[in-house]
Amino acid sequence: MTAEFWLALGRVAPVYNLALVIAVVYLFFKLFTTPPVFRTIYVAPWKFMFFALCIFILEELITVLRQANLVSIPLHINGFFELIIISIFLYALLLQKEHVTEKYG
């Protein structure tokens, strides 16, 4: 593979990410609209995961707009977004661990 292929792939990857996120947002919508009577899971961590997904969507939109030269936001901003996303993932994991410990342990 040539370097041009990898460069082109790197330029279209954020657009593909946004296209695939549509399916994930639909699944979250189905999860959150399920009546609580039929819902057998602990939903609180999933709400935080959805918030992290929204931050990811914002990050990808900024990346696409930056590549199209429509905005001039510095590149290091993506690192802050990723730090927030990872922190939210860890918090959701700790919420789930606490729930399992209270319910089953």
Image (cartoon, rainbow, N blue to C red):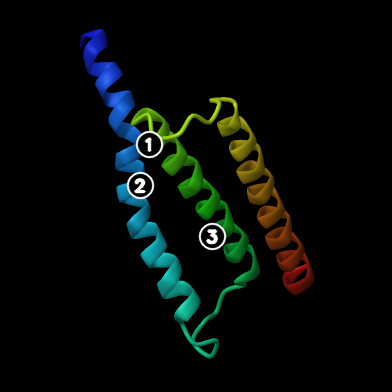
Q: Nearer the viewer, mark 2 or mark 1?
A: 1
Residue under pointer 3: 50
Ranked by sequence position, the earlier of labels 2 and 1 is 2
Q: Give the amino acid at mark 1.
A: Val
Query: Residue 64 occupies which quadrant of the picture?
Result: top left
Residue at left 62%, top 60%?
Answer: 48
The answer to whether residue 69 is above or below residue 87 is above
Residue at left 39%, top 37%?
Answer: 65
Residue under pointer 2: 18
**Residue 47: image location, x then y, percent:** 59, 65
Viewport quadrant of the C terminus:
bottom right
Q: Give the amino acid at mark 2.
A: Leu
Q: CA distance from mark 2 to mark 1?
A: 10 Å
Q: CA distance from mark 1 to mark 3?
A: 21 Å
The answer to whether residue 27 is above or below residue 89 is below
32 left or right of 67 in image: right
**Residue 32: image location, x then y, percent:** 50, 75
**Which element type, helix, strand or loop, lies under badge 2?**
helix
